[in-house]
Each structure stands twice: as structure tokens, then as C-alpha cells.
Image (cartoon, rainbow, N blue to C red):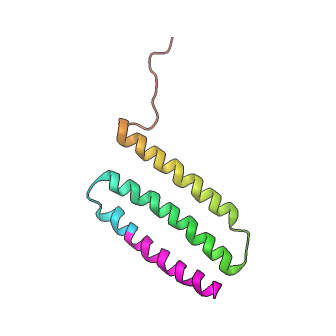
Amino acid sequence: MFMILMHISLFIITLSMAGFIYRVIKGPSTPDRVVALDALGINLVAMISILSIILKIDAFIEIILLIGILSFIGTVAFAKYLEKGVIIERDHNHN
């Protein structure tokens, strides 16, 4: 019964990822696209986690952590870009 639920949840997450990909491509605004990219990262972590449970392999934990970190850094970089227009500020007035 547990494995059936895991397969169903994997299918539902796959459908939601398709919806987020559509939102990234056709999003009405840039912040909508950034939120969809963040949700894609979260769904990718969930998908790999469920796949790891189904396959009974714990080797995917490092991949899950890496994707989570990259997703977070990408979301922060996009948010900073949307707020200020630059990602890395350079101070040209150093003495």
C-alpha cells in the first residue's frame, strides 16, 4: 500500500512540475516566473526523495541537498536582481 502511494505521489508531482514549467514559459510577469522556478526546485527535491524511497537507495541524499542549495541560491539571486537590478554590487569608490 505504501509503494502504491509513493507511485501516485510521484505521478502527481510530475503533473505539478509540468504546470510549473508552463508557468515559467508563459508567466505573465517575471516574479511569477521566479516563483515557478523556486517551486520547480522544491518539486525536484520531492521527486528525487520519493524516487529514493521507491528504489530503497540512500545515495540520492547528497543530490537532494545540492539541488536544494542551488534552488535557494538561484531564488535569492533572482529576488535581488528583481529588487535592485544587479546581483553583485561593486564599490568603485575604494580608497
Residue 43 image position (x, y, % from top left): 51, 66
Q: Compared with residue 34, is residue 61 higher up or lower down, i.e. above or below?
A: below
**At 53% from the left edge and 51% from the top edge, which residue is drawn?**
72
Residue 87 image position (x, y, % from top left): 44, 38
Q: Quadrant of residue 29?
A: bottom left
In magenta, the rendered stretch is 1-19
Relative placement, left or right, of 5 versus 87 is right
Name the quarter where the N terminus is drawn: bottom right
Q: Quadrant of residue 23?
A: bottom left
Relative placement, left or right, of 95 versus 59 is left
Q: Is residue 12 magenta?
A: yes
Q: Compared with residue 55, is residue 25 higher up or lower down, i.e. above or below?
A: above
Q: Is residue 84 magenta?
A: no
Q: Compared with residue 92, is residue 24 higher up or lower down, i.e. above or below?
A: below
Residue 91 image position (x, y, % from top left): 46, 22
Total labels drawn: 0
Residue 2 image position (x, y, % from top left): 64, 84
Q: Characterize the magenta stretch by its predominant secondary structure.
A: helix
Q: Compared with residue 27, is residue 79 higher up or lower down, i.e. above or below?
A: above
**At 67% from the left edge and 76% from the top edge, which residue is drawn?**
53
Residue at the far left in the pictured view: 28
Residue at the far top in the pictured view: 95
Residue at the far front in the pictured view: 1
**At 69% from the left edge and 80% from the top edge, which residue is drawn?**
55
